[in-house]
Amino acid sequence: MTEMDPGIQYMQGGKLEEAAKYFTEAIEKHPDDPVHYINFGNLLLHMNDYERAVRFYSRAVELDDKAATAHYGLGNAYFEQEQYDQSKQHFQQALQLGLEEADTYFMLGLCFLYDEQFKLALPYLQRAVELDEEDVDMQFQYGLALAQTEQLDHAKEIFHQVLEMEANHSDAYYNLGVVSLFEEDIDQALTYFNQALEIQPEHVLAANGKQQIEKMLEDNQ
């Protein structure tokens, strides 16, 4: 068992004060070990203290500029603050340093997706899905990127895969409804919006879509 295991166990068990105390003592004992700063950064990220998390991850990078997990942590901390350009840089650095995992590709893809750079998001989200085919959120976000780049047939296929994995995924039904509207299949779109609302009655976008279709059908009568 490594020295950091107890602190990580405290954090995973929700004992955040104990974890913070343990990590602080570890940093005091070994101030030049980047691992301790990374673990404290992870704790702060878990506590939504993003600005302080950045400071700890940055200190880890100062001590070891090849610390891929520190760059990954910085990417997450900046992402949560909607600073997508900085987030991208650190996720890309994490990849270059060998952290070629599904989560890294996924988060980098999300940065581009949220920054409305849909074509740039696609290859990263596709790679994330290839590495972790069972992750519903990765599949769904990949479907969104496909839809945003007007690859509607492929997007539909992905949204249906999402529903096979999670039958009550209201957003997948909603987006299938949007795709159906683009394809001018009004009846199918209405069916999908209704299915989204059955699962999540407060789904505002599905409700708006349904209302627009019903108004359109009334006007055409």
Image (tube, rainbow, N blue to C red):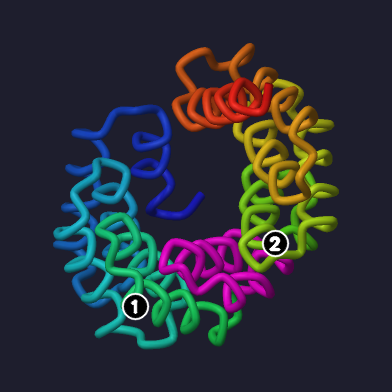
Q: Residues within 10 Å of mark 2 (few under 14, many from 20)?
A: many
Q: Tell me the quadrant of the picture where the C terminus can be found.
A: top right
The CA span between labels 2 and 1 is: 22 Å
Tag in front: 2 or 1: 2
Classify 13 as above or below 90. Answer: above
Q: Is residue 169 above or below residue 59?
A: above
Image quadrant assignment for residue 102: bottom right
**Which label number is shown at residue 57?**
none
Q: Circle 1 sits on which residue?
A: 85
Q: Is residue 70 visible?
A: yes
The segment highlighted magenta reads 100-127
**What residue is at 38 percent from the left and 71 percent from the top?**
70
Residue 118: give x, y in percent of width and height. Answer: 56, 70
The residue identified by callout 2 is: 146
Query: Under tag 2, what secondary structure?
Result: helix
Asked if labels 1 and 2 touch by Cβ distance under 8 angstroms, the answer is: no
Q: Nearer the viewer, residue 81 or 24?
A: 81
Quick one: label 2 or label 1, which is nearer the N terminus?
1
Q: Is residue 63 left or right of residue 100?
A: left
Is 184 positioned to the left or the right of 44 in the image?
Answer: right
For badge 1, the amino acid type reads: Asp
Picture quadrant where residue 74 is located = bottom left
Main SS type for the magenta part?
helix
Q: Is residue 197 left or right of residue 29?
A: right
Is 106 covered by the magenta stretch? yes
Q: Nearer the viewer, residue 213 or 202?
A: 213
